[in-house]
Image: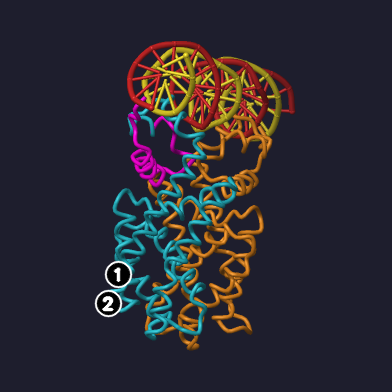
Chain colours: A cyan, B orange, C yellow, D red
Amino acid sequence: MNQKFRREDILEKATELFACKGYTALGINEILVATGMSKGAFYNAFKSKEQLFIEVLDFYATHGLNRIARKLKTDQRKAIKRIEDFYSEMIDMQLAVNNQGCLINSAMAEMGSINTSITQATCKHYNDIIRGLKPTVVEAQKQGDLNASIDSERLAELIHSSFYGILNRQKGLAETDSGKELIRILLTSLN
Amino acid sequence: MNQKFRREDILEKATELFACKGYTALGINEILVATGMSKGAFYNAFKSKEQLFIEVLDFYATHGLNRIARKLKTDQRKAIKRIEDFYSEMIDMQLAVNNQGCLINSAMAEMGSINTSITQATCKHYNDIIRGLKPTVVEAQKQGDLNASIDSERLAELIHSSFYGILNRQKGLAETDSGKELIRILLTSLN
DNA sequence: TCTAACAGACCGACCAGTCTGTTTAAAATA
DNA sequence: TATTTTAAACAGACTGGTCGGTCTGTTAGA
């Protein structure tokens, strides 16, 4: 029988919904309505809600990593400027729709002390993102714009987790400028 | 009729449970079992789950602010050292029980795009905490250990939201040392 | 003919919240 | 002071709805 639903489409819709409502608060039914699937179709394609979420995390992180690679790739701007622009854009993007924030950060916050499989998956993606960031951090260190005496990976970890903290803080505010300024202060201080 | 349950005790238990499981995943029933209350007693004391949670946030933030005042109050240590020690202790404390993390951060992450009343309450407490931090930041600026050219409140905001980000990151890890190191790097860079 | 893709009725468990009582201490009344 | 009234504090059965997941089919392509 021909497939009526593309897995990618389902994952995309589910990603949106999970990012907006979180894991627990989002019901399977809502996904079914949003995608037009039936229960039968859904559970034929996915083992469980948990397995879907883990796949969603993977989908989300893969796209995020692609975005990082694209936005941070070498061009005429200095490395530090590319990093700053990247995070500035991210703040706008992530809060644009419903103050959602980043799924990786939300998943860790919500599931970190409940579900070990989800926590492990989230952590793996977190590490991948940090590693994705690292080359540009190294470049900025070489250019003298980030402190070269700090281990590059630690620095990338610090920058990215601080960004998540700042992003989450912004959810309660109506604007995004203060978050961007905090990022700017952070990056200029880290030299 | 005499009260059988003290409101403070209920709030304390509920705080623990919410911190561990989050808002959505924690059922009223679990609170009833943990406290020994009946449904009748609970709904006589609290209007709803939402109202309880808002009260729990208040309870949690009040205790947190007291802790900040206590731990950061002037002593023989320099201000920057008090700040560092404070966050170092916080990382141990918050992750000691079940990798819970901080309720303010978790509440913002989980509810930030779902429930406006909860988001508003959380945001208010977030601001209070930043203001609680500010005097010590000012002191550290005067002592030349934090960059005096940055607005004190912004600096406090940056430090604290970065801390939340780092704390959340730690949930996926088995140890707490790397988090403490990130805090140390952050604080020494911010001079 | 076989089986993956689908449809949707159905399941028990649980959810937040209500409702009907009962207990009991304090306020009102005699 | 003795008695009655009132209402807050409680107990727990109950409600309607939702949850994740299963089951029994049907359809259609290999």
- Whether residue A175 appears in magenta in the rendering, the answer is no
Q: Residue at x 41, y 77 (%)?
A: B152
Q: Which mark is residue A85?
A: 1
Pointers 1 and 2 in contact (CB under 8 A)? yes
- Residue A77, given in percent of the width and then of the height, sits at 27, 77
Q: Which residue is mark 2?
A: A77
Image: A41 above or below A83:
above
- Secondary structure type for disc 1: helix
Label 2's element? loop
Of A185 and A15, nearer the camera is A15
Crowd class of label 2 (few under 14; some 14 to 19; many from 20; radius 10 Å): few
Eye-nearest disc, 1 or 2: 2
Does A63 sit left or right of B75 as displayed? Answer: left
For marks 1 and 2, give the CA distance. Answer: 10 Å
Location of residue B146 in the rendering, given as x and y in whole percent from the top left corner: 47, 83
Over which residues does the magenta segment extend? A1-30
Does residue B136 appear left or right of residue A61 in this picture?
Answer: right
What chain does badge 1 belong to? Answer: A
Q: State the image quarter where residue A137 is shown.
A: bottom left
Let me know if residue B161 appears in the view: no
Q: Which residue ends up furthest to the bottom in the rendered image?
A: B144
Residue B179 appearing in the image: yes
Where B28 falls versus B159 (above or below)? Answer: above
Q: Could you say where residue A57 lies in the image, as x and y percent from the top left?
A: 45, 49
